Amino acid sequence: MAEKKDREHQEKSLNDQQAVMWKKDKELFETEEKRLQDKIKGINSQNADFLNRQVADKKMRVSHPGMNKNENQYNRGLLKMINNKRKTGMSAYDGASRAGAADEE
């Protein structure tokens, strides 16, 4: 009879130990899952911010086409040269080929 009680006591003790291990495993799993969910939420938030910036940039470009004032001032000389070449019908390649042809003659 004592032997049976000892076995039952040992089984209960082992079951309690197993329950404690399962509880720890469950807590670790839940902690890791929460960490992963938070990480995913953060990445999704960053991606949403990036996409919103892209949409805002596109809207700005559509509503304000062309160069801004500083870019226009910086490129003014080059733009005038391009515009003059367009008016005369001469491209940069035409000028180079005509100059080369004149040298050959």
Image (tube, rainbow, N blue to C red):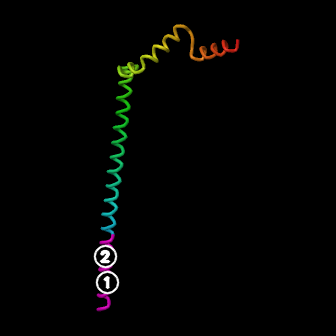
Judged from the image, the secondary structure of the residue bearing numbered disc 1 is helix
Mark 2 residue crowding within 10 angstroms, few (<14) / some (14–19) / many (20+): few
| Residue at position x 33%, y 81% in the image | 11
Say which quarter of the image contains residue 79.
Answer: top left
Q: Residue at x 60, y 17 (%)?
A: 93
Q: Position of residue 30 (x, y in %)?
A: 32, 59
Residue 21 lies, with reference to residue 78, above or below; the image says: below
Q: Which residue is mark 2?
A: 17
Front one among 24 and 78? 78
Residue 69 in the image, given as x and y percentages of width and height: 35, 20
Q: Earlier in the sequence, mark 1 or mark 2?
A: 1
Circle on res. 55: none
Q: Quadrant of residue 66?
A: top left
Q: Position of residue 80 (x, y in %)?
A: 45, 13
Which corner quadrant of the image does residue 98 belong to? top right
Magenta segment, prevailing SS (helix, strand or loop): helix
Residue located at (57% from left, 17% from top) = 92
User: Where are the magenta residues, as a range?
Assistant: 1-21
Task: Give the answer, above or below, for where 11 lies relative to 33.
Answer: below
Q: Name the residue that disc number 1 marks.
A: 10
Query: Depth check: 39 or 14 in front?
Result: 39
Relative image position of residue 81 (x, y in whole percent): 48, 14
Q: Does residue 5 show up magenta in the picture?
A: yes
Above/below status of 71 relative to 49: above
Callout 2 secondary element: helix
Q: Nearer the viewer, residue 80 or 57?
A: 80
Which quarter of the rendering shows the N terminus? Answer: bottom left
Q: What residue type is disc 1 on?
A: Gln
Q: Relative to residue 28, is residue 2 depicted above or below?
A: below
